[in-house]
Image (cartoon, rainbow, N blue to C red):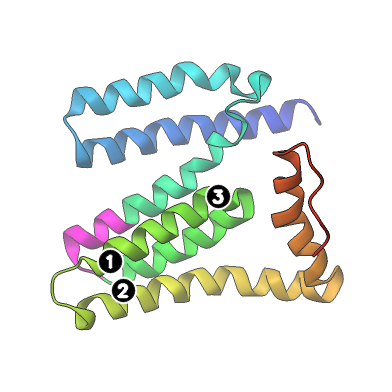
Amino acid sequence: AGVLIPRLIYAFFAVILVVALYQLGRKVMPAHYALLGAAILAIAAPRSHMMHLLYGYRYMVLAVWVLLLYSSYLETGRLKQMFLAGMVGGVCLYFRVTPALAVSLAIAIAVLTHPGGPRAWFPAWLLYAAGLLLVIVPVLIYFATTVGLARVFDEVILHPMGMLQPLPVPVM
């Protein structure tokens, strides 16, 4: 079970990512380019765990889902999509911090370009942040009461930084 179940989870994430990337690609480029991008990703999927070069790419499915929800907001103007995008962005933070932060900052900047000025983009920002916080705050409260926020900071920020460089990261 310890070998089979994680592989099934990784395969599920890889398949969903390929489909989500194709859907996102269809929104921003011709269909044959979107298919090419999804096919390249599908070809790389089976070897990604063994290579460890692409280990975390599977979790990008959540960031792509956030972008699809944002795209839906742009098409329909329904602010509910921004709230849902924030919630998925919060879940994305549990798997990989970098894609979640990147997609959240990209959406924050993109919302600023919305025509209509602050009256148009402030509610979108507010609902995205509310969705994000709705998912993040309960987990942070749980960790604060069990292991402490200093330990969470070490594991989420300092430990990954230390793995990327040969020099030790100073204690903060």
Question: Mark 1 and 3 residues: CB-CB less than 8 Å, in contact?
Answer: no
Residue type, label 1 = Val
Camera-nearest label, 3 or 2: 3
Question: Which span of residues is magenta-colored?
Answer: 70-78
Q: Earlier in the sequence, mark 1 or mark 2?
A: 1
Above or below 83: residue 161: above
Taking the spot 77% from the left edge, 55% from the top edge, the residue there is 155
Q: Is residue 80 magenta?
A: no
**Circle 2 SS class:** helix
The numbered disc on residue 98 is: 3
Q: Position of residue 21 (x, y in %)?
A: 36, 36
Residue beneath the point at 18% across and 63% down: 76
Q: Given the image, on which type of amino acid does mark 2 rest?
A: Ala
Q: Which mark is residue 124?
A: 2
Graded by Cα atoms within 10 Å as few (under 14), some (14 to 19) or many (20 or more), the crowding at tag 1 reads some
Which sits earlier in the primary sequence, circle 1 or circle 3?
A: 3
- The location of residue 85, given as percent across then percent down, is 40, 61
| Residue pointed to by mark 1 | 111
Q: Position of residue 42 (x, y in %)?
A: 44, 21
Q: As displayed, is residue 118 above or below residue 63?
A: below
* Residue drawn 78% across the image and 59% down it: 154
- Cβ atoms under marks 1 and 2 closer than 8 Å: yes
Query: Residue 154 versus residue 56: which sits nearer the camera?
Result: 154
Q: Disc 3 versus disc 2: distance between alpha carbons?
A: 22 Å
**Residue 54: quadrant of the picture:** top right
Q: Secondary structure at mark 3?
A: helix
| Residue 152 as seen in the image, left or right of residue 92 | right
Mark 3 residue type? Thr
Say which element carries label 1: helix
The one nearer the camera, 146 or 15, is 146
The question of residue 75 being in magenta is answered with yes
